[in-house]
Amino acid sequence: MGGSSPVQKRQRAYRRGLDAEWLCVLSLRARGYRILARRYRCVAGEIDIVARRGKVIAAIEVKARDSAAGALLSVTQRQQQRITRAAEQFLACHPQLARCDWRFDVMWVTAERSRIRSWRRILPQHLTDAWRV
């Protein structure tokens, strides 16, 4: 009987998400962002990455999907509200950031098959200011 159990599928998806976050952090650092928090959790919600560049703080949702469209469509309005509430909580815990501008971004990682079958490129992409509150 081939196939994976639901638990194995969830574990693989979780690891894939952690790998995507790591790649996004590397990409952000390479572009001059300072990472303030990873997997910030509070009662209100969770933010995958909180990053700062200059006077802008970005609350970043990371998605690992087969396509960019799939990644963007997976960030629902309900999820946006949870991230927004978590950002408000983060700001309440870090009053020194009150004068910074906030924005909400989405980053996604897709695996794109190349012409050489055994090689795959991992491509982090970044949509800044994905939604407003």
Image (tube, rainbow, N blue to C red):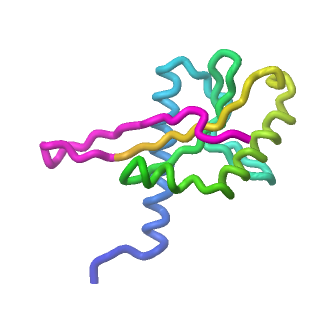
Q: Residue furthest left?
A: 116
Image: 13 above or below 18? below
Residue at x 36%, y 38% (from the top left corner): 123
Q: Residue furthest bottom?
A: 1
Note whether 128 is above or below 14 in the view shown.
above
Asked if residue 113 is among those painted magenta in the image, a careful observer would answer yes
- Picture coordinates of residue 39, whole percent (x, y): 64, 44
x, y percent for residue 44:
79, 52
Main SS class of the magenta portion in the image? strand
Residue 126 covered by magenta stretch: yes
Identity of the residue drawn at 42% across and 51% down:
69
Q: Nearer the viewer, residue 12 or 68?
A: 68
Q: Is residue 129 left or right of residue 120?
A: right
Q: Position of residue 12 (x, y in %)?
A: 43, 60
Q: On the rendered structure, is 53 left or right of 29? A: right
Residues in magenta?
111-133
Residue lying at 68% horizontally and 27% vertically, measured from the top left: 57
Residue 16, horizontal then vertical, whole percent: 44, 52
Q: Looking at the image, which is closer to me, 102 or 112?
A: 102
Q: How many marks?
A: 0
Quadrant containing the C terminus is top right
Q: Residue furthest front?
A: 132
The residue at 52%/23% (across/down) is 29
Left/right of residue 123 with respect to residue 127 in the rendered view: left
Q: In the rendered view of the protein, which quadrant contains the N terminus?
A: bottom left
